[in-house]
Image (cartoon, grey):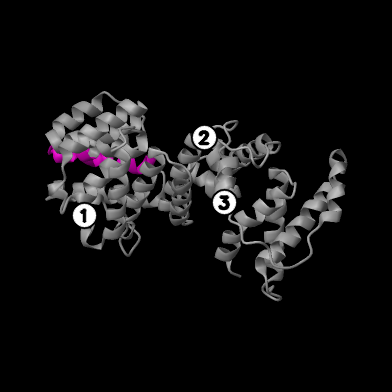
Amino acid sequence: MNEALLRSLTPSVLGILVRRGADFAAAEDAVQDALVEAVRVWPADPPRDPKGWLVTVAWRKFLDATRSDAARRRREDLVEEEPAPGPAPAVDDTLQLYFLCAHPSLTPSSAVALTLRAVGGLTTRQIAQAYLVPEATMAQRISRAKRTVSDVRFDQPGDVATVLRVLYLVFNEGYSGDVDLAAESIRLTRQLAAAIDHPEVAGLLALMLLHHARRATRTAPDGSLVPLAKQDRGRWDTQSIAEGVEILQAALARDRLGEFQAQAAIAALHADAPTAEETDWVQIVEWYDELARLTDSPVVRLNRAVAVGEADGPRAGLAALAALDDALPRHAAVAAYLHERDGDLATAARLYAEAAQKAPNLAERDHLTRQAARINARRSR
């Protein structure tokens, strides 16, 4: 059973059902039922036209569900429109589905969860793990989101800013999670950039390309994390870096600075440095200042503290960190790094161990645990 094939066909099949009159929630349920049927049937009897098979079965599932709901008996008129088995039109509705999932009536967190479930193909359990909440909580959140958009017309677009936020967060989930959504996010952002003349769309595309260019070096063969300073820059994708920088420069030239452009500028400065030691940290601090002004985000200020520590020394970084709430995610990890650079190994080891306990995923937890062990080994010499 080719799970990747099923995942790739899901958005188009879902879009076809919605265009034929199914509300989003019912269509999503019908497609999921069809996928379960495919897993059961295809190994013994693979169809010649997988997409056409899924459309036919999903439509029948939708009609069956409609007939059983007395409050929706009016939908039985759609029985006569049941499509005959055969090739389905090659239409990519994925970006339209992002706009539907990112409807302004949803909160950003609900929009991302719904998109990951309905379009990205992640299970409710995977999404719950990404958000660090119980599976039942996430299931309720997704159900509420589906009910919210169930009466939204398919051609009623969501807010572009919300779509950008969802694409960004889905890219991050694909970049660090178990299911690879990063390349798909880049593809959809390219489509959006071709359709909309917006500097922030360009900024997001540049940011994705610059981050994706380093992906092969982010982990070691054993799966452990490799910090940016220790990555093999010779393995970075120079073509993606060049494209990202070119797109970013064109966006910045329009003098309509936004959050994604500022993030991309920081990523470009990292990509431009031949070695970690040659990184232009002074400029990076300046871009973090711009980013903090645009977002007023404590996470941005946390990252800025690291940059200040590199540009002006660890004590300056610790002074910047002192102004932030120590309950912030990764606050302890940043403090540990700056204390290590300042020579306070005892505090650094303690904070690395504390950060490991709060890590959002296993890879980061293992990395921080190894950092604590490394510092303790240095202290015992």
Asked if the magenta segment contains residue 177, the reply would be no
Under circle 2, the secondary element is: helix
Q: Earlier in the sequence, mark 3 or mark 1?
A: 3
Residue sitting farthest toward the bottom = 44
Local packing at callout 3 (Cα closer than 10 Å; few below 14, some 14-19, many 20+) is many
Q: Nearer the viewer, residue 192 or 291?
A: 192
| Circle 2 residue | 108
| Circle 1 residue | 230
| Circle 3 residue | 94
The region drawn magenta spans: 337-359
**Is 324 located above or below residue 337 in the figure?**
above
Q: Position of residue 337 (x, y in %)?
A: 22, 40
Which residue is found at the position 55% from the left and 44% from the top?
98
Distance CA(mark 3)–CA(mark 1): 37 Å
Give the amino acid at mark 2: Pro
Q: Position of residue 83 (x, y in %)?
A: 78, 60
Which residue is found at the position 57% from the left and 51% from the top?
94
Marks 1 and 2: which is nearer the front? 2
Q: Answer yes or no: is residue 356 visible.
A: yes
Which residue is found at the position 76% from the left and 56% from the top?
59
Q: Earlier in the sequence, mark 3 or mark 2?
A: 3
**Mark 3 vs 1: CB contact within 8 A:** no
Q: Position of residue 210 (x, y in %)?
A: 31, 50
Under circle 3, the secondary element is: helix
- Asked if residue 361 lies left or right of residue 220, the reply is right
